[in-house]
Amino acid sequence: MAQRAAGSIRYDVPRSKVARVTLARPDARNAQDTRLLHELNDAFDRAAQDDEISVIVLAADGPHFSAGHDLRESPEDQAMDQYRTVGTWCGFGCEGAERQMAREKEIYIGFSERWRNIPKPTIAQVQGKTIAGGLMLAWPCDLIVASEDAEFIDNTVRMGVPGAEFFQHAYEVGVRKAKEMLFTAQPVTAAQALTLGMVNQVVAVDQLESTVLALAENIAQKPLFALKLAKEAVNTAQDAQGRVTAMSTAFAMHQLAHTHNLAVHGSLIDPSFMRPGATNERGAK
């Protein structure tokens, strides 16, 4: 596979046993193109495979955590043969719905599931807006610390699809709020997210980094093997409630919506979403 120098992700070790992976596309509000997602996956693998690292922090440059999928990415930049394949579905060169499903199964739901199941504790450090695909970066993390200005938005129903590919909504905010979140596209504020149990702490913007690093240092003092076992025990409890089946069903519905939109509109999403004046997935300013 072609080798690319990291340009969308920054990796450092700010504290003993703590790795920090930073989304570094602030000018694009950390919108996720194919390159960013693959570089992020590589950085997570690096931290997971380093026995000197016990905790992984996911942070982001700029005023917003992530504006979601980069809808302006060109087909050439989406070419999957430029990157290392980590899943087994493949089929990226096939025709029709198979190609689209293969791509999203690899870099969207596939990557998010991989990141959720990294054995080491992970902490998302979230400020500003986290929109649609951005939720698929924060939600796989074990803990979320948010700044007071943080907002969490899934506006994909406006695009003609039934939610972000990593369909964790009901487990993050509960069934009623999940429906409201999807039906209205209105933001869940940091204060609401704390009440709902979606985030662990809400702090002032200027205290966000120090709070996250203090939390990471606290966790990193614990025996790593015990941390791994505790994480797997909790994840298994959630999966035993039917999360995996629900996720697979929602992903299939997401693909159906894409196929419907292609048949009706000639594009993967409803084109009215991209018209001037419409709020799109890159709505963070």
Image: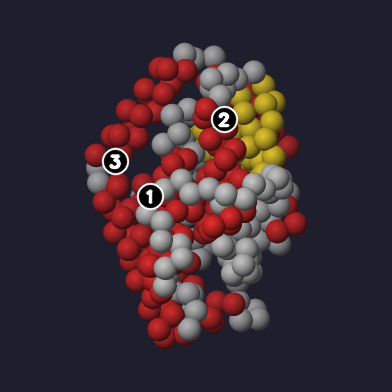
Left or right of 204: which side holds 130? left
Separation (CA) of disc 3 from disc 2: 24 Å
Of mark 1 and mark 3, the one earlier in the sequence is: 1
User: Which marked residue is nearer to the observer: mark 3 or mark 2?
Assistant: 2
Q: Residue at x 43, y 79 (%)?
A: 261
Please give the label number shown on residue 88: 1
Circle 3 SS class: helix
Label 1, label 2: how far apart the Cα atoms are = 22 Å
Q: For the C terminus, which image quadrant? A: bottom right
**What residue is shown at x 49% (from left), y 29% (from top)?**
121
N-term mark: 3 or 2? 2
The three-letter code of the residue at mark 3 reads Asp
Mark 3 neighbour density, 10 Å: few (under 14) some (14–19) many (20 or more): few
Q: Which mark is residue 239?
A: 3
Q: Residue under circle 2?
A: 47
Whole-percent x and y of residue 263?
A: 40, 84
